[in-house]
Amino acid sequence: MTEQRRFKYTHDVTASEFTKAVSLRVEEYFQTRGITRHANAHMLFKTVLWLTLWVASWVWLMSGRFNAVEIVGVYVVHGFAQLLATFNIAHDANHSAYSSSKRVNRVMSCVFDLMGVSSYMWRLLHNDAHHSFINIRGADTTLISGNLFRFSPHDTRRSFHRYQHLYAPLIYCLASLDWVLTKDFRWLSNARFGNLTIARHPRSELAILFGGKLFYGTYVLVLPLIYLDVPWYSIAIGFVVMHLFIGFTIALIFQPNHFNENAAYPDADEDGRISNNYIRHIFDTTSDYARTYPLTTWILGGLNLHIIHHMFSGICHVHYPALTKIVMQTAQEYGLCYRENKTVTGAFLAHLRWLKVLGTSDAVATT
């Protein structure tokens, strides 16, 4: 990104009665119950469960019990275990929500690196760029697709975008392969993430990035190629199919949260000023889905309850269901519209409908 502006919200958070009220009520929730904002026994159970599933599925893969076709299915199971570990553990840790200890958060965030994704680049792209400036052109890196998609009304509409709602699910499947193989390396050459400018990436972070890639490639590809008595192409196909599954699932979970017809796409002025405050901006640009499905929330690490996640990303996701009720009640009192879709499928279809709108008309951005 060549963006030179420094972005800034023009209104202070404390100037909004809604943001003051919701922040106070969230704080009271923890104080009156005497509970931690971070990982509790429930979260520790999930941590052990998902990491055990990750290890067990790999041991299962390496057991030598499967033929050339079955091995592909086992790879998909292992991919599912990778998703569960990253959604539930690494994502929280990278937001400093897992523990009050910086060291513990850093260690647990390396679950990303074990799964082939750089925890360092995730923090830059996700925390510094996306979380700070949702749907803001020039700051939010999730809007960048190399013109392959038109995610925002501010983007230039190209002729092929009329088909983007059709080819999007197919392209989304490639996202995980791209991230593991190229994306982290491509973004290393970038110096700007949101308002953060990096002159030189820390050597320790680069060591973890490259070490993580080496570890991932070794355990998920090299060792199976060496030790499993199946054709090499079965392992290659299994690896690719696993990542196609992971890529589509990531899109299914993340894309509907901000890219839909109900989300706002405010544009910063030439000086980078955004006419809003941070908390209200989150509320205007973010949607929840499948709120009434506890199992979905439990499996996804609360990522379907995205409004509360963006408002208080430093709080462990096990608290999201209770805190979302607080947000909904407060929003109703202050006359604000809480945006949600009832199901995962409904949310993703709404996302595709929005892509169709953006691809076939010069939709006007909401502010």
Image (cartoon, rainbow, N blue to C red):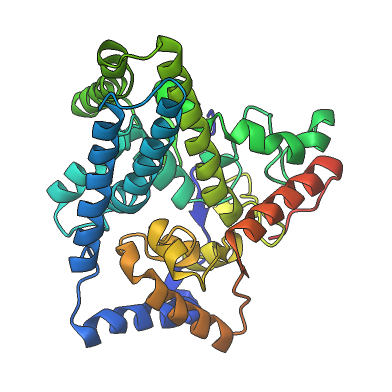
Nearest to the observer: residue 169 or residue 242 = 242
The one nearer the camera, 10 or 124, is 124
Is the C terminus in the top left, top right, bottom left or bottom right quadrant?
bottom right
> Where residue 272 sits: x, y (%)?
56, 47
The answer to whether residue 179 is seen in the rendering is no
Residue 350 place in picture, x, y as percent: 70, 56
Residue 317: percent from left, percent from top = 34, 63
- Image point 52% across, 62% down: which residue? 282
Say left or right for 219 vs 356: left
In the rendered view, would you say 52 is above or below 10?
above
Figure check: 33 above or below 187: below
Is 1 drawn above or below residue 304 in the view shown?
A: above
Q: How many marks?
A: 0
Q: Position of residue 344 (x, y in %)?
A: 58, 58
Res 120 quadrant in image:
top left
Q: Residue at x 61, y 43 (%)?
A: 137
Would you say 109 lies left or right of 272 here?
Answer: left
Residue visible at 29% across and 17% down? Answer: 228
